[in-house]
Structure formats: C-alpha cells, structure tokens
Amino acid sequence: MHADAVVIGAGIHGCSAALHLGRAGISSIVLEQAYPGRHASGVNAGGVRRLGRHPAEIPLSVAAMGFWLNMEDFLGQDCGFRRTGQVKVAEDESEMERLRQRVAQLRSLGFTHEEIIDQDELKHLVPAVSGHCVGAIVCRDDGYALPFQTVTAFRKGAEAAGAQFKAGCRVDKLVRRGSIWQVQTSRLMIEAPILVNCSGAWAGGIAEQLDEPVPVSVEAPMLMISERVAPFCNPVVGATGRPLSFKQFENGTVLIGGGHRGQADPARQETQLDMGGLAFSARTAQEIFPCMRNVRVLRCWAGIEAVMPDGIPVIGPSAKFPDTFHAFGFSAHGFQLGPITGQIIAHLAVQSETSLPIEAFSIGRFLE
Amino acid sequence: MEDKRYDLAIIGAGPAGMAAASSAAGFGLRCLVIDEQPRPGGQIYRDTGHSPLANPDLLGPDYREGEVLAAEFGKAQMEYLSGAAVWHVDADGVVGLSREGRAWSVAARYILVATGAMERPCPIPGWTLPGVMTAGAGQILLKTSAMIPDGPIVLAGSGPLLFLVAWQYLNAGAEIVGFVETTSRANYLSALPFLPKALGAAEYLFKGLGYMKALRKARVPVFKGVADLRVEGDSKLEAISFSVGGKNKRIGCDTLLLHQGVVPNVQITRALGCEHIWDIRQVCWRPRLDDWGRTDSEKIYVAGDGGGIGGAAVAQIQGRLATLEIARHLNIIETAERDRLAAPHRVAMARHLRIRPFLDLLYRPTEVMRCPSDETIVCRCEEVTAGDIRSMVRMGCLGPNQTKSFGRPGMGPCQGRLCGLTVSEVIAAERGLPTAEVGYYRIRPPIKPITLGELAAFDAPEGKQK
C-alpha cells in the first residue's frame, strides 16, 4: 500500500497529525498495533490545561487552547470539552509563595492565563475544598474533555480528510529505499516518503530503528473513578506540594489521579496497579476534599505513557532522515497538546517550518 | 527471614471453600478463609445451621446437607474472616481486604478462588422495574430473613433453581399465580441423547420431577415453551406478559422472580488476567484450569462453580482436590499420595458430572435472553440498551472494553457483573463472530467497590515476598 505519509500510532497525536496532513492535501496511512485510542490517549484523565506547564510548552499549549475553545467548528463536535477552569491549590503559606513566584515568572514572559486567587475566591470557586487550603492559581479557560471521544473525533476527522487507519497492525521493521520508507508490519507492507513517529510508549523502539536512540522511559500513571455523587465541584483541581488531579464529571463520577505509577508492560500492552500508590492518592484527595470519605471507588486503571528525562516531549524533524518526524514522550501531559502537535507536524511536512518555537523539543538534545 | 505468609488463602466459604479449608487444616496448612457473609455456607447453604425459619426442612434436604459441611468447617484449625470483602488480588498472592471500614492486605503462598456462581442476567423488557428480582435473590430472602414477598408471585425463565425456589416458596405458603418456563421444545430434543448418561446421577432427575409434581399438586398454572417475555407496568411491576402456543397471555402479579441458570463468577480470575475459555455448552466464560484447579497463574487455584458450573457436590470435591495439589507443592505429601487420596474423589466427581450435559442442554438460555431486543436495557447501572450496544458496533466498536468508552456500559456500581455476558454476546452476534473472539470486559481493581476513606487508610504490604 502507498500513501504520501505513514503515521505510526493512532493516539491523539497520530490522529491529529493524520487529520492536519489530510487537510493539507497529504494522504496518510495510520498504523496502530491495538485500536485507535487504546492506550494513554484514550484512558488518560482528560485534563485540558495550560496551568502549570513548562515554559517551553506554554506557546504550544496556548495555541492548542485555540482549537479546544473552537472544537465544534474544527471537528463538528465538542469532544466533551468543558471550560470549567483548572485550579491548583496551595495548602500552606510557603506553597502560596511558590505559586506567586510562578505567576510573576509567567507575567515576565508575557503570559497572563494563570491568575492568583485568595482563600475567599477559592472557597467561592470550589466550596468543597478543605479549609486548610490558603489560596490557589486559577486558569479560567482550562477544563477537561473526554479522552476516548476526542481521539475518536480526531480519527473520524482524519478519515474524512482521506487518512486510512490500520488497526491491529504492529510495525516490525523500517527500511529506507532511496527517498521512500518501506514499513513492514505484522500484516501489511506500507510505502510512503513521509514517516511520522507518534507511537507514545513504543516510540523509543521506532527512534532506535531510525538510528536516533533516545532515553525514553515507560510509565503507567494510575487513575481511579468513583460512583456518581451529587455535583459538588466544577473546576479541575490540583495541588502544589503533592501530586493530585481531581475532577467531577457531569454525570457525577469523580476522577482522581495524581502522579503515582503502576507497572507498565509495553510488550504485552498491559499494566499492573500499585495499590499502595492508589492509597496515597486517595489520602491526598480525601484531605483536600473531606466530603469524599464515604464515596465508593469503582474502578482503578493505568495508561502506558512515554516519559522523557527532562519531562518535555520530542516534537520535530528526525536528525537523521529527511521527511521524517517525531511527536512522542509527552510525559503524561500530552492530551491537551494533541490538536497543535498535528498541525506542527503538517506544517513541517508541507513547508519545512512552523511558526511555533519547537527548538526545546528537538530530538537532537538527546543525541551526541 | 521467617515467612509470615499464610500457606493458603481461600476466598469464599461456600461448599468449595469450606471443604478446601477442612482438608487444608487436615494437612496442617496455615490457612485463612475470607468470606463476605456473616456465616459460612455460600449461597446454596446460606446461614446453614442458623436458619431463621421455624422449620428449615421446607428448604429441602439439600440445604440441610450444608450443616454437615459447616460442622466440619467449624472444627477445622484455620483463621476465618467473615463479613470481609476482597477488593484486590495479585498473582504473587497478596489479597486486599476490607471489613467494617478498614482496609488491609494479607499475603499467602497459594490462593484458592472459591467464589462460586452468579445468576445469569435475564434482560427482558421492563426487568429493571421495582417488583422484579432474581429467583436467587428471592431465595436469599427466605434463607436469611424467613421472608417471602406479599401478594401474587410469578416465577419465569428456566433452570433447576427456578423449580427449587418455586417448591420452597410453595412450602413457605407463597401465593404463586404462575410458573412460566422459557425452555424450548428444541432444548428437549437436544438434551434427550444425554438422558441415559444423566441416569447415572438419577437423584438430580428425581428431585426435579418431585418439584414439578408439587407445582401440579398445588394447582399452580404452568406455561411451557413461552416466548416474548415482557414486564408490564409504569413505575412498578404490574404484570408479566408472554406468548405461548401462538396466544398472548398476561398474568398480574406483585413480584416476579426471574432466572435462567447460573454462570461462573469470574471477577477475580479476570482481574488477575488469567486465561478464560468460552464454554460453548454452558454458554459462559470460565477460567482455564488444570485437573487440580490451577489457573495459568502459578499460585492461583479455582474450585467450585467459579471454574465451571458443576453444583455443590462437585464444588466440595474440587475444593479437596485443589488442596491436595497445594499440599504436594508445599512438600507435605508426595505425588503418589496425592493421587491415591484423589482417586475416590475423582470417581465421585465423574458420577455427579453425568447430569451436566443433560441439564446444560435442556436449560440452555434462549437466543432472545442472550441477545435481547433493541429496547431492552442491558446495563442497569448506566441504562444502556441492547440497541445502544448494536449502534456502537456499527460505529466501529470491536469489543466490550471499547463499549465503555463509547457509552459507559459496565462502568457503574455493579462493575459489569450484570451486563458483561450480554454485552459480549450482543457484540459477537452483531459482528458475526464467535463470542470467544470478542472477549470480555477487562476487570480492574477494586474487585468490589471500596470507599475512598477505606482506600486512604490502606497500608500497602512492605516488601512483598516472592
């Protein structure tokens, strides 16, 4: 099979790349070892946030927000995006000071999306929050979306733009023939001049085949979800001194995550949970939301994520081959960036440049 | 370092768990039995020896057999934790427990899952209305509270338990206004060739015939080979309607007991990621086990109906067989001794199992009960209909796990127990594939819901021993 581009991985970034490529007139075949959205992209917490991002990611995150706020126009559906705001609470005065410094740093860089609020305003925004929280940062246009619905919408958008998806198709070998990539998979052979590596936790293997090995590690961030309870919390809430991600969906269920990792087995595409880590997250959630004590947890799970040593992704051209691009290693915070990553890849493929600053994400930073 | 682990943790104190614990104690194993109920017995022998009924004989002689087993269990040397829920098990033998608001974990060298069967879901239009319950739930009411529902009662569906409950309800003075059987004539024909073999365990047949005779004697209207079962009523059950012999019937009632057989409860073996087989004859999933009940996970064994439906007598034997093999692994007995002790159990088990092919084929659930009409709710927790599942398939959904992302079936408080089988079968039928290929929900912990407070107070085991 032939196409202009072969995209490896049908997560949010691969689907978005195929969509933007298709709309730019570049046909693509998307290869997926499982099914679209099976791993990190479909099962993550769905946070759509600029709040708290690494300075290098902020321009991309701000640009991505433009898509999220207009998703209906872009994809014909809202992907479950709700502009609830995101809040990061300070549990004592020293944490509050850290938050003030953070916002001052962003102002000096010219960004105003993060805003300091005091205890009264916090109580107003999140009445259920524990009294010991002294204040917070809020990012009012942030929110959350439904991950699987989002990946599915991007996949359908890509298909409408001419992309073909091949599920259950694992990449075995990449062979360069002149200016063409021959991709041998478990059931098909694909040929295309352009290659895009969006294979998340499996991207390290692809990069190695491209002779540019990178120190990507694989992690399994854990999440838990509760039974339905009456609405009590509108924004997505995080903490400053310890990991927490807390949100109540419209159906009343509460999703709790926060940094703790299970064990990932990328070869078998499976994860094992660490109940001790989940207990730690439960303690954090209960201390910040005491009303959660008697709410039942129904299900815990983990996604399989690629994490880079510096915590920011690899986005950009290959250092070894022309017309070859990477977008992986989002280190458990890539979901919000999905819409813009695809656009960057399409711009690089079509016009060899992007207007966004991506030097910090170069694969070259890990190569000698 | 001293190994503080139990030799064996048994989950469930029904026939399989009680028998296994008694044998394990006989071998001197350090054994822990964990059960959700306040007293041993499982579902079949629920509250055995402590029945609140003035005359427990009305439950029948089988129920009284539980007293013997419970007495042996009561004398055995082991630790018994009643009223405790197991919310996590891992393949290394760590079991997460919660009881009275506290959560902790224990470690064992081997685990025996003896969690038994659960009733196959009976998705018919209106089955979620108040007044409708399963025959099993109706039986528990009688066993644990000596209660039967007031007013006219109808029993509908198929399977041996439906007859037993009808008989027990008659004995307890219930007002049964209809016994509505969905078993088709075709089932009688397909089961017939297995009747001679079943005669080798004829006591099961005689029991069944006795129940039918009692229904006739009490002049209960019996309808056979019915179709188009439907619950009528707006906010609660008012009547059951069905078609029989080309005519439509309607019976007003206050309570409807539905049943169509039992299936293995595979939540724990599924959560462990054990390999499961689609059993074509019993129309359900069961874990793949060796002759001693061991799963494909080295330390995890299954005994009783959780490994395939065989009934209480078979469950006890399987509990003892698994214990023999575990005792061998612990170097308490030699292989030859294990085989010598197992031999009479294997003979008895083979005899009890002679009835199964006949019963399985006779009471095979009807197609429409397995793959209900579009309007029928499949997932009760999230109110997802069979039609919703079919439209998910048309949107590209390949299996049960993806349906969760498309529309939330299986994500409510019952954790997929009540819809899992139906969702797998509806998808398989819609895609034209065998159910085995479509698969089942991935079951993730907690295996039973646990409060955030309990989880927050959970102390993880320090440095798991392998």
Image: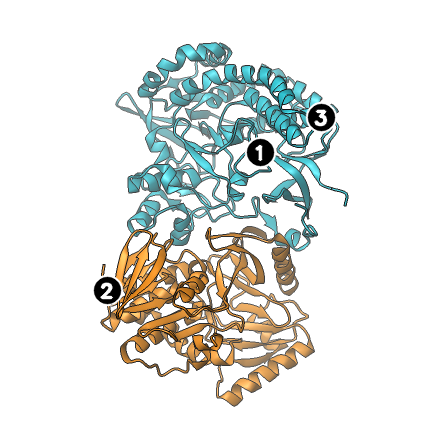
Q: Quadrant of residue B224?
A: top left
Judging depth in this view, the residue of B151 and A122 nearest the camera is A122
Chain that bears disc 3: B
For disc 1, the marked residue is B301
Classed neighbour count for the residue bearing mark 1: other residues with Cα under 10 Å, few (<14), some (14–19), many (≥20): many
Residue at 50%, 88% in the rendered image = A109
On the picture, is B173 further left or further right than A172?
right
Q: Is residue B12 visible?
A: yes
Q: Quadrant of the C terminus of chain B?
A: top right
Per the image, the residue denoted by label 2 is A3
Going by the numbered disc 2, the residue's amino acid type is: Ala
Residue B131: numbered disc: none
Q: Are marks 1 and 2 on the same chain?
A: no
A62 over B145 or under it: above or below: below
How dense is the environment of label 3, judged by Cα within 10 Å: few (below 14), some, or many (20 and up)?
A: some
Camera sees residue B128: no
User: Are marks 2 and 3 in one subunit?
Assistant: no
Which residue is labeled 3 in the image?
Answer: B27
